């Protein structure tokens, strides 16, 4: 998988499914098994564990990869397990007032992250993996490096966040300078850049925009390094903010991105522009947000709204 430059998350997910598959069949080696054992495992996931279709599809993809690339015996699954159809769901969207209420319940760096998720349309990991060099305060741009699908893109930096982000970077710079004085201050660099630029891991442009407070020992070199904030910390903060805000919707960090796209379309921006800002491959992916505009049903007027005076007033029910 590393030879094929798969993402770390895909690597972890596929490896996890292989472990579950082997344990399900009492530690038998995959070479001793085949299509029937894979079908039995996927059937158990669907019938006993009642996993979502997307989870079952991911498990099947992991095992297909295992047998094709590792075992060297591709599976013929089409006759044994039908591929589940993943349902198309309309995303949850907050209106502007609700976004303000949720952001108002966040504090410190979590509020700034939430503002960027909504104001720039970033995914959570895209935001947390930002480096200092990816933020252009003068041009009010953010460069997303190796986003979903290993694609780079440029999105906007909202004016509402530019000042706060500048002040935040000053504080991060002070923390970085103290770490350098203590003999640490390094970060992990992508690919082989650490060999090509030996001192880049301690340079300011390569530092995380949202660094973690604690450092850790690199398992390969033993050097003390700093990672970015963990996604779970931000997810917990946003979930608690949604609860305190009283918004009656099942909102999460990704809801800010959905709201960003929907509000741009409501403001009249071209859907291809929104597609580029979101980093979608196909405009059909972006078109899902045309279903959740404030004018429901793509602006169609309901015939019930034309009843007017012809609709009798409801009777007053006694207590």
Image (tube, helix red, strand yellow):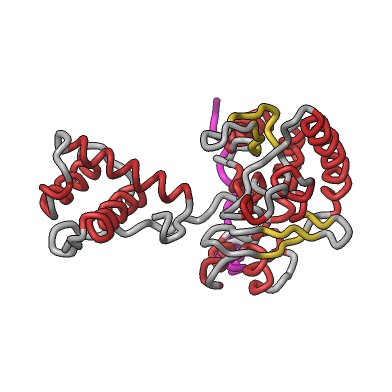
Q: Is residue 295 left or right of residue 53?
A: right
Q: Residue at x 87, y 39 (%)?
A: 170
Q: Is residue 291 left or right of residue 87?
A: right
Foreground pick, 83 / 133: 133
Q: Residue at x 72, y 70 (%)?
A: 269
Q: Residue at x 53, y 72 (%)?
A: 282
Q: Is residue 160 left or right of residue 36?
A: right
Foreground pick, 43 / 290: 43
Where does residue 55 sit, x and y in percent of width and height?
34, 47
Picture mark count: 0
Quarter residue 48 falls in: top left
Reply above or below: 234 against 42. Answer: above
Indicate the quadrant containing the C terminus: top left, top right, bottom left or bottom right: top right
Indicate the quadrant containing the N terminus: top left, top right, bottom left or bottom right: bottom left
Where does residue 33 sit, x and y in percent of width and height?
12, 49
Say if residue 308 shows up in the picture: no
Where does residue 250 sit, x and y in percent of width and height?
55, 40
Reply above or below: 267 against 207. Answer: below
Foreground pick, 302 / 16: 16
Say if residue 135 shows up in the picture: yes
Quarter residue 217 falls in: top right
Reply above or below: 121 against 100. Answer: below
Q: Residue at x 71, y 64 (%)?
A: 154
Asked whether 305 falls inside the magenta stretch, the response is yes
Quarter residue 147 falls in: bottom right
Where does residue 241 sit, x and y in percent of width and height?
67, 32
Q: Range of the magenta residues? A: 297-319
Asked whether 66 falls inside the magenta stretch, the response is no
């Amino acid at each position: 998988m590393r030879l094929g430059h798969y993402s770390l998350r895909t690597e972890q997910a596929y490896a996890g499914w292989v472990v579950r598959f082997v344990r399900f069949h009492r530690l038998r080696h995959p070479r001793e098994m085949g299509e029937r054992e894979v079908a039995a495992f996927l059937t158990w996931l669907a019938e006993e564990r009642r996993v979502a279709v997307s989870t079952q599809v991911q498990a099947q993809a992991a095992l297909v990869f295992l047998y094709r690339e590792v075992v060297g015996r591709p599976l013929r699954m089409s006759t044994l397990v039908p591929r589940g159809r993943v349902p198309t769901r309309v995303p949850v969207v907050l209106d502007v007032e609700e976004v303000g209420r949720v952001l108002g319940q966040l504090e410190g760096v979590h509020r700034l992250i939430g503002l960027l998720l909504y104001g720039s349309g970033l995914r959570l990991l895209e935001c947390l993996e930002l480096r200092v060099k990816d933020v252009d305060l003068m041009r009010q741009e953010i460069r997303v490096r190796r986003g979903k699908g290993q694609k780079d893109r440029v999105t906007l930096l909202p004016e509402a966040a530019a000042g706060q982000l500048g002040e935040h970077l000053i504080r991060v710079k002070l923390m970085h300078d103290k770490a350098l004085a203590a003999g640490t201050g390094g970060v992990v660099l992508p690919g082989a850049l650490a060999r090509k630029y030996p001192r880049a891991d301690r340079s300011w442009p390569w530092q995380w925009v949202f660094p973690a407070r604690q450092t850790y020992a690199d398992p390969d070199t033993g050097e003390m390094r700093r990672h970015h904030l963990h996604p779970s910390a931000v997810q917990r903060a946003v979930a608690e903010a949604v609860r305190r805000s009283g918004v009656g919707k099942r909102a999460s960090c990704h809801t800010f991105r959905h709201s960003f796209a929907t509000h741009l379309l409501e403001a009249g921006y071209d859907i291809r522009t929104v597609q580029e800002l979101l980093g979608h491959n196909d405009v059909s992916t972006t078109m899902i947000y045309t279903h959740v505009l404030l004018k429901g049903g793509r602006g169609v007027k309901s015939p019930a709204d034309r009843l007017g005076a012809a609709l009798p007033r409801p009777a007053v029910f006694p207590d």
